[in-house]
Image (tube, rainbow, N blue to C red):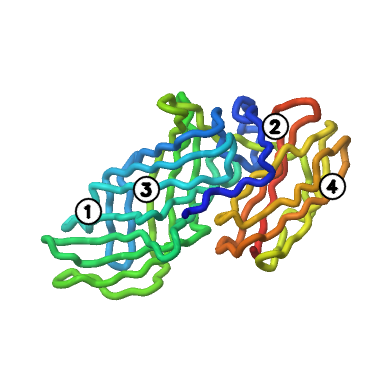
């Protein structure tokens, strides 16, 4: 079963999506994908033809749809099931793209319009399979397996109700290809890393049949983290980050969300309140299972004591799980 984005400290509130924070004032702050509803369905439509390029040539798909879900009102990333259709190969043949249960993972970057990243998540032993055909004869079979930290994806908000455009331009895709028969058959290639994928997807959020607002929500820095990067040494190991209140308010640690494929990380849940400026608390992050992702993210969220509205937080990266 494909794992979803791990969520740590599940006491996230419903008010973040309703509290708009101007992106112009958050030039160096992280953002989350924020929905106005707690549990929603994500639908993505391809805005222009997508292309996949490798040793065998280029496959172009005129139509594409993406589907997924978002549990909770904030996420650092989400999984999308792709369906690419009306595909051609080098303008002289056809192509078929079978996801076989693999999903595209989009990971938020820093503020609206900046560069995020992507991953491909598959069940064990599964691959995305691309088959090219000319005159009813198979010319190449391309397998694309699970991989992470692919660059780059740019996110921008659009429309009303609000939606998110994801401009995807991935390079360094790893793939293998098996030759078919006859003229124009590809060569055998194993574990090549020169694959490229380009496409633009508009992501919309639905609660039932009604479209909800999906937007990019910047998170102002209310906590200082020391260090801002933790290094783990595999399963069962942990490391500690010190959190310090850098505001003039009494803060409550409202929770944390994490991008950690396979539910790899666990919060120690040791910190709860920062009563005044310069108050500190040490929180632990533990590696539960080995992850192929080198740099995972954890975002701590805070609210002012006595309120229910998220007012900011702090982001750290975690390596070595």
Q: Describe the element under mark 3 as helix, strand or loop.
A: strand
Residue located farthest toward the front when viewing the structure as drawn: 1
Q: How crowded is mark 1: few (under 14 residues within 10 Å), some or many (20 or more)?
A: many
Front label number (1 vs 3): 3
Q: Is residue 235 above or below residue 268?
A: below
Residue 310 got which mark? 2
Image quarter (top left, top right, bottom left or bottom right) of the C terminus: bottom right
Front label number (2 vs 1): 2
Task: Identify the residue under disc 4.
Answer: 281
Report the residue at 24% width, 71% height from top. Answer: 186
Residue 76 got which mark? none
Q: Describe the element under mark 4 as helix, strand or loop.
A: strand
137 to the left or right of 74: left
Q: How crowded is mark 3: few (under 14 residues within 10 Å), some or many (20 or more)?
A: many
Q: How far apart are marks 2 and 1 (CA)?
A: 47 Å
Residue 139 location (% of width, % of height): 20, 67
Task: Identify the residue under disc 1.
Answer: 88
Task: Identify the residue under disc 3.
Answer: 82
122 to the left or right of 55: right
Judge by depth and name the residue closer to the eye, 288 or 229. 288
Residue 231 location (% of width, % of height): 71, 63
Q: Is residue 21 visible?
A: no
Q: How far apart are marks 1 and 3 (CA)?
A: 17 Å
Q: Can residue 274 be seen in this view?
A: yes
Q: Describe the element under mark 1 as helix, strand or loop.
A: strand
Judge by depth and name the residue closer to the eye, 149 or 255. 255
């Amino acid at each position: 079963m494909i794992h979803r984005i791990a969520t740590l400290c599940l006491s996230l509130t419903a008010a973040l999506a309703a509290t708009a924070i101007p992106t112009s004032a958050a030039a160096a702050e992280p953002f989350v994908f924020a929905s106005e509803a707690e549990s929603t369905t994500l639908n993505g439509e391809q805005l222009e033809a997508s292309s996949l390029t490798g040793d065998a040539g280029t496959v172009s798909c005129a139509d594409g749809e993406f589907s997924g879900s978002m549990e909770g009102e904030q996420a650092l990333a989400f999984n999308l099931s792709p369906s690419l259709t009306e595909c051609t190969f080098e303008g002289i043949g056809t192509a078929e793209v079978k996801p076989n249960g693999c999903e595209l993972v989009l990971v938020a970057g820093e503020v609206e319009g900046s560069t995020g990243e992507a991953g491909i998540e598959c069940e064990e032993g599964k691959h995305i399979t691309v088959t090219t055909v000319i005159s009813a004869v198979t010319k190449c079979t391309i397998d694309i397996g699970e991989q992470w930290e692919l660059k780059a994806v740019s996110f921008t908000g659009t429309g009303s109700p609000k939606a998110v455009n994801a401009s995807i331009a991935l390079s360094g895709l790893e793939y293998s290809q098996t030759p078919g028969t006859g003229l124009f058959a590809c060569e055998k290639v194993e574990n090549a890393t020169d694959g490229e994928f380009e496409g633009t997807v508009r992501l919309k959020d639905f609660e039932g049949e009604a479209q909800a607002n999906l937007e990019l929500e910047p998170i102002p820095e209310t906590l200082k983290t020391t260090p801002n990067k933790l290094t783990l040494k595999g399963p069962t190991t942990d490391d500690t980050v010190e959190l310090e209140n850098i505001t003039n308010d009494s803060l409550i640690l409202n929770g944390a969300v994490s991008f950690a494929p396979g539910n790899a990380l666990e919060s120690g849940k040791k910190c709860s309140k920062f009563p005044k400026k310069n108050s500190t608390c040490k929180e632990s992050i533990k590696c539960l299972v080995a992850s192929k992702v080198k740099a995972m993210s954890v975002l701590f969220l805070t609210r002012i004591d006595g309120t229910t509205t998220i007012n900011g937080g702090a982001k750290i990266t975690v390596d070595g799980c």
